[in-house]
Image: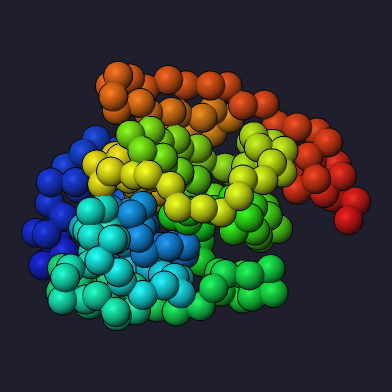
Amino acid sequence: MLSNDELQRYDRQIMINGFGEAGQEKLKKAKVFLAGAGGLGSPIAIYLAAAGIGSMRIADHDKVELSNLNRQVLHWEENIGRSKVESAAEKLHKFNTGIMIETIGETITEANVSKLVGDSDLIVDAMDNLPTRYLLNKTAVEKGIPFFHGAVYGFEGRAMTVLPGKTACLNCLYHGASVPKEKFPVIGVTPAVIGCIQATEVIKYIVGLGELLTDRLLTYDALQMKFNEFKISRDPDCEVCGDKGKKR
């Protein structure tokens, strides 16, 4: 049941055709696992909080550094040296006191990922490396919950949504490819765009509106100001979501 304050706070989105109070109730009940509180995690968390998501579990083991501040807008100069999840939670609580924020200051590993995700309704990828993304994708498939992928590099970004058992997964796209973990260029406006796309996908999924970015990869080139879309087919031999994965 929505309170009078909630009806007033979310009045403009409740007005959207097909959204209504029922959609807002769905957001209020949703539990989101957000992997990362950095460049992508900041806009994702901000706009999910603004929309009235019920509960957010945020995992990130890093501390705030000066070099983060060109893109990680949840963190300010006064937060340098502080845990990112604590810094993020403080801002989000001030922004919207009606949502629950759970913080996990741990590194996501194969040993703990399933426990960290717990009973969350979906997983949002705001990471900066492929190995952890593969773990999150695999966990989403095993738990049968949606996975919302996003990645950035410089002025470029990409996004994709995975519905286990129905659509191509991240492994179908990258086929287990590895990229050396290294410092890479990025300007803050790029994760702002991609993070907002991911948050939009999450909201659409929970409320049940529109067409999701399933079986397709959306790419963004800010320098040319172009979006492109690539069809992604589910691989029946995928070691995560295909027949090979099921035999394990």
Name the residue at 37% across, 22% down: 227
In this rendering, is residue 232 above or below 65? above
What's the image's color scheme? rainbow
Query: What x and y, as percent, mark residue 103?
Result: 40, 78
The image quadrant of residue 150 is: top left
Query: What x and y, as percent, mark residue 76?
Result: 17, 68
Quarter of the figure with the C terminus: bottom right
Name the residue at 33% across, 34% down: 155
Name the residue at 80% across, 45% down: 239
| Residue 122 falls left or right of residue 200 | right
Query: What x and y, as percent, mark residue 138?
Result: 68, 55
Quarter of the figure with the N terminus: bottom left
Query: What x and y, as percent, mark residue 174?
Result: 66, 37
| Residue 222 falls left or right of residue 202 | left
Residue 100: tell me if it is visible. Answer: no
How many numbered discs, if any?
0
Name the residue at 43% across, 62% down: 36
| Residue 56 falls left or right of residue 144 | left
The image quadrant of residue 31 is: bottom left
Residue 179: tell me if it is visible. Answer: yes
